[in-house]
Amino acid sequence: MWFIKNSITRKNLMALTGLFLCLFLVIHLLGNFQLLLPKEEARLQYNLYSDFLSNNILVKLISYGLYASILIHTLDSIYLTIKAKKAKGSSYVKDNRGRASKWYSRQMMFLGSIVFAFLVIHFKDFWFVYKFGTLPLDTNGNKDLYGLVLVSFENLWYVLLYGFAILSLGFHLLHGFFSAFRTIGLYNPKYNSIIKTVGIVFAIAITFGYFIIPFYMYLID
Ligand code: HEM
């Protein structure tokens, strides 16, 4: 039987915000798949879609929840890491964790930091320019966000930076998805392997989906 066994704790909050961010990743990826359409069709459709998102009040409200989730998830991870380090103290002599867990499960903070650093760059280059910068308009009169994305992925180093960040995100999800379910208590030994498998499929699909976009755009330009 599925059951919720914990009240809202910091760990739960991290798991819940993490799962909300997973949901965002799916929606953002589906939106970004429009970039893979033939060039001029992609330009008009992507710009129209982005214009709709930025003017819709409901989407705006969800976006505030998204920004809050990113901050809460990041701050809680820092707090819990410091707390765990303090708890271990100096008695922590020999590190045998490699035998029991995968390397990416032990590097969640490091992988998460790479994703956070990526998000700072991502917001600066796309989000900020779209919301507050001046962009040329397409033939429909919408801001040409597609053109901005296309020009950004002209640079191979920028494409590689995205590739690296997306791989880091993938490993972060590989542990995070399953771990989040366990933390909030939506967990039953009977369904353990199903959740694990869903987590692995989710992490691979998200990584692959995001990964191909910068490389595709680099190649078509
Ligand atoms: C590879 C492909 C990606 C492309 C082409 C892309 C493109 C964009 C663009 C153009 C924007 C600004 C327009 C807007 O605010 O809607 C944006 C916003 C955003 N992106 Fe991405 N993105 C990519 C990957 C990612 C990844 C991997 C993450 C998360 C780790 C991410 C998280 C965000 C967030 C949080 C926003 C702000 C959304 C909002 O204001 O509601 N993006 N992205």
Image: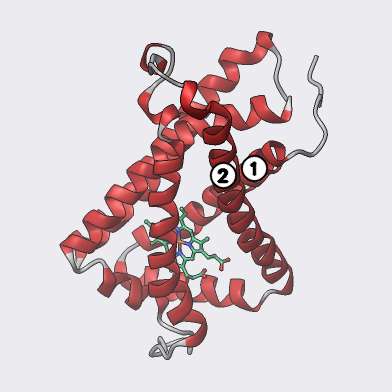
The kind of residue on which mark 2 rests is: Ser
Q: Residue at x 40, y 81 (%)?
A: 144
> Measuring 54% from the left and 20% from the top, which residue is drawn there?
196
Q: Which mark is residue 45?
A: none
Please tell me which residue is depicted at 71% across the width and 37% down the height of the picture.
12
In the rendered image of this protein, does residue 153 appear above or below residue 211?
Answer: below
Q: Where on the picture, by quarter, is residue 34?
A: bottom left
Where is 111 relative to 4, above or below? below
Q: Residues within 10 Å of mark 1 (few under 14, many from 20)?
A: many
Residue type, label 1: Met
Q: Secondary structure at mark 1?
A: helix
State how many labels appear: 2
Tell me where residue 93 appears, x and y as whole percent.
Answer: 40, 18
Q: Which residue is mark 1?
A: 14
Q: Pointer 2: residues within 10 angstroms few (<14), some, or many (20+)?
A: some
Note whether 131 is above or below 219 in the view shown.
below
Residue 49 screen position, x and y as percent: 53, 70
- Dividing the picture into quadrants, the one containing residue 150 is bottom left
Furthest residue in direction front, as rendered: 90
Q: Which residue is mark 2?
A: 77
Q: Nearer the viewer, residue 185 or 140?
A: 185
| CB atoms of marks 1 and 2 within 8 Å | yes
* For marks 1 and 2 on the same chain, the one whose residue lies earlier in the sequence: 1
Q: CA distance from mark 1 to mark 2?
A: 7 Å
Q: Residue at x 52, y 29 (%)?
A: 89
Q: Position of residue 170 (x, y in %)?
A: 40, 39
Quadrant of the frame with the N terminus: top right
Left or right: residue 1 versus residue 71 is right
